[in-house]
Image (tube, rainbow, N blue to C red):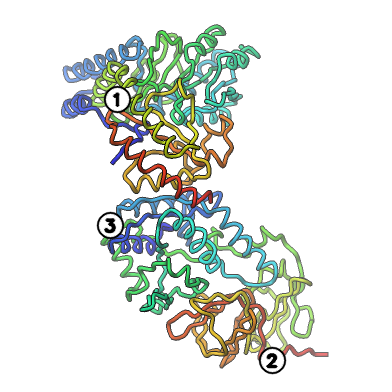
Amino acid sequence: MAYLDHAATTPMLPEAVEAMTAQLSVTGNASSLHASGRQARRTVEEARETLAEALGARPSEVVLTSGGTEADNLAVKGLYWSRRDADPARSRVLASPVEHHAVLDAVHWLGEHEGATVEYLPVDTYGRVHPEALREAIARNPDDVALATVMWANNEIGTVMPVRELADVAREFGIPLHADAVQAFGQVPVDFAASGLAAMTVSGHKIGGPYGIGALVLGREYTPVPVLHGGGQERHVRSGTLDVPAVASFAVAGRLAAEQREWFEREIGALRDSLVEAVRTAVPDAILGGDPVDRLPANAHFTFPGCEGDSLLLLLDAQGIECSTGSACTAGVAQPSHVLLATGTAPDLARGTLRFSLGHTSTEADVEAVAKAIGPAVERARAAGLT
Amino acid sequence: MSGGVDSAVAAARAAEAGHDVTGVHLALSANPQSFRTGARGCCTIEDSRDARRAADVIGIPFYVWDLADRFREDVVEDFVAEYEAGRTPNPCLRCNEKIKFAALLDKALALGFDAVCTGHYAQVIVNEDGTRELHRASDMAKDQSYVLGVLDEKQLAHALFPLGDTVTTKDEIRAEAERRGLAVAKKPDSHDICFIADGDTQGFLAGRLGKAEGDIVDESGTKVGTHEGAYGFTIGQRKGLRIGTPAADGKPRYVLDISPVNNTVTVGPADALDVTALTAIKPRWCGTAPSGPGSYTAQLRAHGGETEVTAELVDATLEVSFTEPVRGVAPGQAIVLYDGTRVVGSATIATTTRARTTTSVA
């Protein structure tokens, strides 16, 4: 079997499994004052320090959450509410149109229910937001902008955004910029302090850690209004008893993601390059999505004209090759990806996409399997056409 | 896989028989409801989830194919247009002909599959020379060959009906589903028309065609009531006429005729419904078309009984005479001809000949 859907989730690292299982039988609420609680708190705080180091942040900036979706919601909604509370004029939210749904739908919700004016920033054909575009949008009226959110790297087409430059523009106007770095962490250099971001989302299960754990890295000057109210954990920004085994495991995975990042970029990037080459050889008219150079090293996204992405998925799945169309589903019905539509791809073309995403367990055999199967699969899918 | 128990068990049996099975749920509505309501058993997101859950238990891949556009064009619009023209269509036959064994089958064949397998109760028998015959299910009470009567031999060659060849009650199918760990074992049966979620066909048609008040007249042409749209009636219908004036003889009255041109519905006594002959168009044959007149049994409705007929294909029109008069025959319905248990073919009823002509009272 060739598992090429690491962007959906990647196998847990053995070290992360070990760290997690070691904690599963340990009792202790990190908020308790007794010895068990102190032990749990020590585990959590050491994990927080490890994660902070891996992310170029201070430990106090790491707000643990239940995952990427929660961190995105906390950043987008929480910062919107707090900034608007401080000044009711701030009702404009700037977002890239290629965000993950965890950001996109949160932003949309603010527009529907919280009186936000949502403005989608223009992107180029690679799905990149240019700093000038952000500057133009903010400069129109800097006083009414609550926040801006632009992902670090796109989960579908792999394009890496100029985060540092974008953050510089936002800072110039005193606007907090949030970046969803779920796909970027472990693949491209992610340094929170150097980035100039106000907030940044990371997730455990995309880097070899467990499901159900993530973090919002949050500058200390920001106090978003909580989405979850309760016991006041995590700077009173995110209440809820901490999942100590998941936190410990996440930290191990985070440390390894940072330590092995250069290896990952070099080795997995080379594998990805040979996969792209193999697909192009088998299907000369396949279109590589996203920036050909400035992209995630593990991402290979293609559009196959005349094909239904679902058909390709079915045919490859039947041969043990697991990948994704990269687009969202409505009741299981494939819809053209909002990312591709935002980059100006025609809707019919946007239906014929496949995302291969590699990871730490990927091998040359995986690439060979794709090289062998993709040509006949595309031929068949074309015969089946677009229904 | 609709999300119902029959298609789930059919898929499980096909997989168990050694076929390489992939589950496909058809998304037939552009705006599916979230949850199942009333007697409906497919086409909601909940049904799609039920189907996926069954596929996961069986251990087969599962995909949702969006055929909503094709379904709307070929089935729903046709349904509305037929009613608008005063006819009574059967959308299930149309769906089998145009969607399940056409759009779905074509895509499946192109992708390298060999057949479409459904939970219909019917049998395909392969002859020694390789030709195929469609037969009624072993269990006559469950037989659904009528709605498959539109399939031609090419379509039959790529059809699998794993439920048709065992005599099983619905309870036994449910027990089998239970045994196989399929959570849909206790799910209620679906009936009515799948794209009319609340089962209110009249309301659906009124929404599509608008209200158009017209007269209800008796056989003499005397106005006996009003209606809100002639399309809302079916020949043979008795209920819902809301006629104020009782018939002179005090007998119940039925819809005899629907005239969309002057928006009039004619009512009369039951015996005026007796039909002795009909013509039917757009014939489709399971195998070669019969030549010359022949004796068959015919079925005129999905749950109707059998009736003896002689039929002959004259040009492209099927001319049918009934041995005994039958009632409740409406243009637009399908007539399916059988030779014993074998489906010979089907056609769409165009005109009927009544046993007694309408008498006009001066």
Q: Are marks 3 and 2 on the same chain?
A: yes
Task: Residue under label 2, please give it.
Answer: B356
Q: Chain of mark 3?
A: B
Seen as rendered, the residue at the extreme right is: B362
Q: Does B315 sit above or below residue B357?
A: above
Q: Chain of mark 1?
A: A
User: Answer yes or no: do the residues labelled 1 and 2 have beta carbons within 8 Å?
Assistant: no
Between A75 and B338, the residue placed more toward the observer is B338
Q: Position of residue B334 (x, y in %)?
A: 57, 75
In screen coordinates, is A41 left or right of B143? left
Give me the residue at 40% from left, 65% from top: B119
Q: Earlier in the sequence, mark 3 or mark 2?
A: 3
Task: Residue under label 1, please give it.
Answer: A241
Give me the residue at 47% from left, 79% from top: B343
Q: Secondary structure at mark 1?
A: loop
Query: How crowded is the residue under tag 3: few (<14 C-alpha within 10 Å), some, or many (20+)?
Result: few
Q: Does B67 sit above or below residue B120?
A: above
Task: Residue under label 3, please give it.
Answer: B181
Please name which of the two marks, 1 or 3, marks the residue nearer to the observer.
3
| Image quadrant where residue B81 sits | bottom right
User: Answer yes or no: do the residues labelled 1 and 3 have beta carbons within 8 Å?
Assistant: no
Identity of the amino acid at label 3? Gly
Q: Chain of mark 2?
A: B
Quote the CA–CA distance across marks 1 and 3. Answer: 37 Å
Quote the CA–CA distance across marks 3 and 2. Answer: 57 Å
Identity of the amino acid at label 2? Arg
